[in-house]
Image: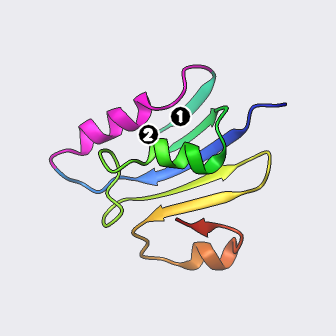
Amino acid sequence: MPVPTFVVIFKLAPSPTRNRRERTLHDRLTPGTWWAETGSAIVVSDETPIDDFCDRLLAQDVFDPAADMAVVFDLDSGEARARGSFVDFGLFHLAPWIEKI
């Protein structure tokens, strides 16, 4: 069975803990093949299902759902999850299959 490939787009709100939270988020990516651009978009292969991947990557010690936002797309299955604080809900109109978790 092929390993799912996820696209993660995120924004961590400015705070005294932002740098630590971003480093921890990156550390939670499975070692292996991955690509990151500007620290806000990551493409990564991971063996876990999308919900388990989101729970691990976006745990409360890294991710503040009241201030941060993230969208995770599974490129293979077409599933997507969104978590956090969204100002522009246009994303959910453009891509109605995204589940807000």
Task: Please tell me which residue is depicted at 65% across the width and 43% down the height of the picture.
Answer: 6
Q: Amino acid at mark 2?
A: Gly
Q: Position of residue 33 (x, y in %)?
A: 63, 22
Pick the residue in front: 54 or 32.
54
Instruction: Tell me whether circle 2 and circle 1 mark residues in contact (CB < 8 Å).
Output: yes
Figure quadrant of residue 28: top left
- Above or below: residue 14 compared with residue 53: below
Dot 2 crowding, Cα within 10 Å, few <14, some 14–19, many 20+? few
Looking at the image, the residue that sits furthest to the left is 16
Looking at the image, the residue that sits furthest to the right is 1
Q: Amino acid at mark 1?
A: Ala
Pick the residue in front: 47 or 40.
47
Figure quadrant of residue 64: bottom left
Q: Secondary structure at mark 2?
A: loop
Q: Which residue is mark 2?
A: 39
- Above or below: residue 37 compared with residue 8: above
Q: Position of residue 53 (x, y in %)?
A: 56, 43
Task: Please tell me which residue is depicted at 77% across the width and 55% down the height of the picture.
Answer: 78
Task: Please tell me which residue is depicted at 15% across the width and 47% down the height of the picture.
Answer: 16
Dot 1 crowding, Cα within 10 Å, few <14, some 14–19, many 20+? few
Left or right position of 3 against 72: right
In the rendered picture of this protein, how many numbered marks are placed on residues?
2
Q: Position of residue 93 (x, y in %)?
A: 65, 80
Q: Secondary structure at mark 1?
A: strand
Question: How far, Cα to Cα, is label 2 from label 1?
Answer: 6 Å
Q: Quadrant of the N terminus?
A: top right
- Let me know if residue 23 is in the magenta part: yes
Task: Please tell me which residue is depicted at 64% across the width and 48% down the height of the picture.
Answer: 50
Range drawn in magenta: 16-32
Q: Position of residue 10 (x, y in %)?
A: 46, 52
Q: Which residue is mark 1?
A: 36
